[in-house]
Amino acid sequence: MTPSRTLVQSAIGGEYPVVVGPSALTQLPDLLRDRAPAHAYALVADDRVMELHGDTVAEAVGRLGRPVHRLSFPHGEENKNRGEWIRLTDALLERGVGRDGCVVALGGGVTGDLAGFVAASYMRGIPVVQLPTSIVAMVDSSVGGKTGVDVPLGKNLVGAFHPPRFVLADTELAGTLPRAERSQGLAEAVKHGAIVDAPYLERIVAEADALLAGADPATTRMVSRSVEIKADVVSRDETEGGLRQILNFGHTLGHALEAASGYRLPHGSAVAVGMILEARLGERLGVTEPGTAVRLQEAVAAVELPTEPPAGLSRARVMELLARDKKARAGSVRFVLLERLGRVFSGKGDGPPTWSRSVPEDALVSVLDGV
């Protein structure tokens, strides 16, 4: 069996471990005892994940001899909203969970964001631990401390930075996912290669069949490398004032496409298309090496993700959503652009690096032709 790896993520207030590997869940009781002792634990998961893994995790948490409250919510991105945040926080109050409680977030990116925001805001903040069950959560959303909910005007517009006490990514759980869900998660791994590590991107393509099958050791290698990349970026800019912006590559257009579809376009698919469109935008503006978008398109196709926006989306609606993006500054939406695969364009000259930038509207409209 592939051994577990423990990586370290820096955060405001200290560091926390990220444990990656098959059967990593066996370490949960010891990690809770050492890193997140509590009077009571609230296990938060969507209804599907609670049915699949709730008993196993609740039994592991229960070995500490403390109350374990199971709180579930309907699955789906559309349920990462303020209404579910209210319902979950009220449930914690009804069960008498105090400031000495701890939230255990079990699930994919939706659960990590929602449960993390509950923990960040409940009684002005209680501890949270992240137990990601999806590829996207393992490689990206569970690490870095971002939490939040979606609102009608866009994704993640209400939230907080709230680092977990630890992240435990059991890669065996990836084998329980449908192939299409593993594919969705690989969009973030492709992004990590595109912005930081071109050889890693090539390895994802070379091992695409194994990764899409959820096989180890390829899955553990992939999750570990993505965590290393994100942890390094976040440790240098935890609150997204500078370098961390590069993690938004593909997400500015991706989030707009996702919202314009009414969230029928899955997040990974939206990011995949967003990366390709933003690479085309960089090429059109002369800052991205020609041919980058084509090579990125080939990588996206290798992990079975779409390479073009779905038919029927309103370009006007996409432009409207872009203007409301949370990364906008002074009313201008900003994009992360590549210099080439493995390197983000950071500006020219001797000044400080600029990791995101506004772009001319006509260039943006041109890459959205056909949307």
Image (spheres, helix red, strand yellow):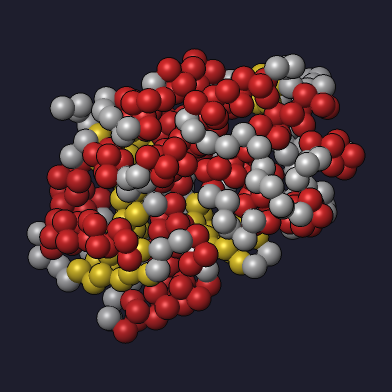
Q: In this view, does 124 lie above or below 233?
A: below
Q: Which of 77 and 89 is in front in this view?
A: 77
Image quadrant assignment for residue 271: top right
Q: Is residue 107 left or right of residue 269?
A: left
Extreme residue in the bottom direction: 94
The x and y percentages for residue 324 are: 74, 57
The x and y percentages for residue 78 are: 52, 64
Q: In which quadrant of the rendered image does the C terminus lie?
A: top right
Q: In this view, does 248 lie to the left or right of 229?
A: right
The x and y percentages for residue 146 are: 50, 52
Q: Residue at x 20, y 69 (%)?
A: 68
Q: In this view, does 80 lie above or below 249?
A: below
Q: Is residue 74 visible in the rendered structure shown here?
A: yes
Count how many numbered circles sit on residues in the image.
Answer: 0
Image quadrant assignment for residue 75: bottom left
Q: Residue at x 35, y 79 (%)?
A: 91
Q: In which quadrant of the rendered image does the N terminus lie?
A: top left
